[in-house]
Each structure stands twice: as C-alpha cells, then as structure tokens.
Amino acid sequence: MNFNIRGENIELTAALKDYAEKKIGRLEKYFEAPPTSEVNIKLSVVRNLQGIEVTIPLPGVLLRAEVKHEDMYASIDLVTEKLERQIRKHKTKVNRKFRQEGRLKQLFRESDAALAGSSALKLLDEEDELEVVRTKQFNLKPMDVEEAILQMNMVGHNFFVFANSDTSTVNVVYRRDDGRYGLIEAN
C-alpha cells in the first residue's frame, strides 16, 4: 500500500505517521495481492477532537471511513476497525454474488477464518440485514436555500429535503460537523 498522509491543524510526527501506516497497513491481509492504489489518510484536529479520514480506492469499490475521538491513536484504531468491517461486508457480498454466477473474485482472500472470529461473522450477518423501519411522504415546498436552512433548524434535524425555487430541482441542506451548512444538488 502506498500511503499519502496529510495533516490539518496538527503536526505530523514520525511516530504518528508510522502508527497510522502500521495499523492501516494490516488491512493488506484481507487482499489476495496488496492494493497498488494510493491510501489517502487525513489527520485533523477540530474543536479538541482528533479526527482521521481514510480513503482506499480499489477496483469496483471505494473504502472510506472517518472517526473523531479525543485521542488520535484511538481514532486510528477505530477507523481501522471500521475499514475491516467494510471489507468483510463487501467480501461477503462479492463472494455470494460470484458463487451464484459460478465465478470467483480474486480481490479478497477466500478464507479468512484465521482473520475473523465467529463473533465478527455474526456481527457481519447482522449488518447485512438492512431494514427500513419507517417511511415518510411529504410534499416538497418550493423555497430558497436560506429558508430551507431555517426550516431544518426549526424542526431540529441535521438535514432537510426541499424543492429549490431557484433551480427547480430537489436539494438537500445539511449541518456539517464543523457547524456550517452543506448543500446537495440533484443533477
């Protein structure tokens, strides 16, 4: 794995870089051949929270995880666990799909019994069962972005779906972790 480590509002020490490379480098054991893509790691500090964001582009899948914690080393450990869960989940789906089609996918190792215990496999099965527990329907009122942000704050949600009166498209405003707002526009 090739690592691209950047820091934002934090001094990147050699020890911190080595720890991140060592922990995230352990993910190589899940692959048939070590990924040649560049692993992007961004370490940051925002409001006394130590954050890490990891992106690993692979053929057919993009692994991405982000964690914020009071301790940077704990953040690195937690983001590694998240990425392991994503790999296991994706591997299960890929293997199931290719078993049904009669082919094998060589991106992930076939047997990871030594890598994952039975409790991890039970957790993976629970994550595979995606269930919609509530459905809402509502009419989209045409409004501008500022009004949508006000409506979102009034209802106390972190996001708000609305019909943008300026562009006549469906948009979403959301509250970012840094307290500012974001806008998602449909094409």
Image (spheres, helix red, strand yellow):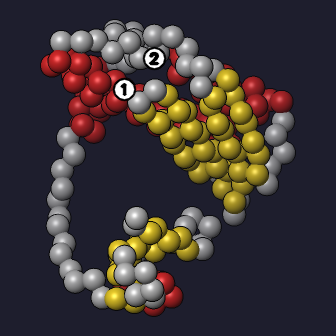
Q: Residue 30 carries which label?
A: 2
Q: Which residue type does callout 2 highlight? A: Tyr
Could you say which is closer to the camera, residue 42 or residue 2?
Answer: 2
Rendered residue at 59%/51% (across/down): 68
Compute the Cα span from label 1 to label 2: 8 Å
Residue 53 can be seen in this image: yes
Mark 1 is surrounded, within 10 Å at the Cα level, by few (under 14), some (14 to 19) or many (20 or more) other residues, namely some
Q: In which quarter of the image is residue 162?
A: bottom left
Question: Contact, CB < 8 Å: mark 1 with mark 2?
Answer: yes
Residue 168 screen position, x and y as percent: 37, 81
Determine whether, in the image, residue 167 is placed left or right of residue 48. left
Q: Where is residue 184 in the image (x, y as percent from the top left)?
A: 46, 67
What residue appears at the point 22 percent right and 83 percent down from the top-left corner? 139
Number of numbered discs visible in the structure rendering:
2
Please tell me which of labels 1 and 2 falls first in the chain: 2
**Which residue is at the front of the view, 142 or 83?**
142
Task: Please provide percent x and percent y for residue 116.
Answer: 37, 18
Residue at (53% x, 33% y) in the render: 57
Residue under pointer 1:
88
Instruction: Identify residue type, mark 1.
Output: Arg
Residue at 18%, 75% in the rendered image: 137
Above or below, 63 relative to 52: above
Which image quarter holds the N terminus? top right
Secondary structure state at the residue bearing disc 2: helix
